[in-house]
Image: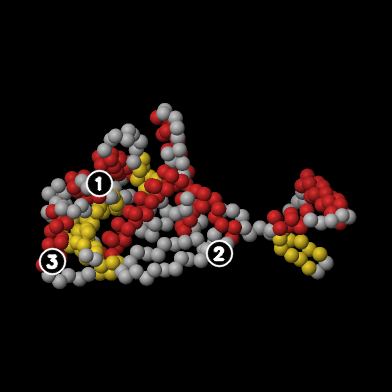
Amino acid sequence: MELIHTNRRGEFFYFVAMHLGPGKDHENPLLYDLVETFLETVGRGVMKRLIVARGFLDGKRIGHLKEKWKVDTLVALRSGMSVLEDARGLLRLGPVKWQDYSPAPRILPVVGPLGIDVPPPPRQDRPPEKVVAFPHLTSWDACPVELTVVLTKERRKEPWGIATTDETEDVPVVRHYYHLRETIGERHRQTKFFWDLTDFHAPDFNLVTNQVVFVALMYTLLQMQLFAENHPELNRLTRRSLLHQMLSYSNHLVVYTKQYYAFFDAPEYTELVMTIEEPGKSKLLRKVRRIRRDYLEGLKFPRSP
């Protein structure tokens, strides 16, 4: 069980809390106990919003987070829940003001592996989603606080809903936050399958803990570095793709002759040298050895600045 911290634009993903335990334990109480421990450690005001999947529907714990810690929870609603049916009933009562929501375009790297420019994929002009909110709903008996239910219109289907304890009127923002949940879920999947988070074979619990915790720390530190260097577009890459992005591609060897010069990359320059015929090859070898000897001697006796 992990807690991942991000911002509204999804520019970084930090592991901030983690629980390791038997797989047979139910996830719902584990998550809210982990959140409670995190809040007791960092204090009120650090966590602003908790975004969870519908598998973590727990009205009592959601209300507790709002009343004690002022943390707003955003969660999808299941079909048949009274608060969702009430929102759909209000929708059928009369005209409502639908608002447009379009997911923000995903940021892609400008430069691909080995310096190859990566053209952005062709944009598919999808029509915006239609969203509407119904605030101050109290028909979820297990939840002691008021909820705002946001409905998203679907063709030939009943609108699906998400609920939040936030009393906002900016409906597209609420929908955007839930869109972030999909991105956060992808980070969980990526660390498991592409960052060796689960690549352990020892049955010893301490060794398993060491593997999981240190991989999560390494992943978080790398995310911090990418964000600090203003490369948020790289945070979505797998480890292998990120290594390709970090390959050197702008280093060149400069060869001068008389009033001319040329740039070569290392493989190209090596190929040219290896294809030189005699006697030029021997003369070049003696020249390179003399330059290298002078270079090494110069390192022993550096000049003062």
Comparing 183 with 301, the one in front is 183
- The residue positioned 22% from the left and 56% from the top of the image is 163
Q: Which mark is residue 144?
A: none
Q: Is residue 251 visible?
A: yes
Q: What numbered label is drawn on residue 117?
A: 2
Answer yes or no: do the residues labelled 1 and 2 have beta carbons within 8 Å?
no
Mark 3 crowdedness (10 Å alpha carbons): few <14, some 14-19, many ≥20: few
In the rendered image, the residue lying farthest to the top is: 204
Amino acid type, residue under disc 2 in the picture: Asp
Instruction: Give the image location of residue 93, x and y in percent.
Output: 11, 67
User: Please, what secondary structure does the residue beneath circle 1 have?
Assistant: helix
Instruction: Identify the residue shown where x is 45% and y is 38%.
Output: 199
Q: Which three-letter amino acid code belongs to the residue tagged 3?
A: Arg
Q: Residue at x 42, y 39 (%)?
A: 198
How far is the residue under mark 3 from the one under mark 2?
A: 51 Å
Q: Which residue is mark 1?
A: 56
Q: Describe the colour scheme in one phrase.
A: secondary structure
* Total numbered badges shown on the rendered structure: 3
C-alpha span from label 1 to label 2? 42 Å
Residue tagged by mark 3?
Answer: 92
The answer to whether mark 3 and mark 2 are in CB contact below 8 A is no
Number of other residues with Cα within 10 Å of mark 2, as a class: few under 14, some 14 to 19, many 20 or more? few
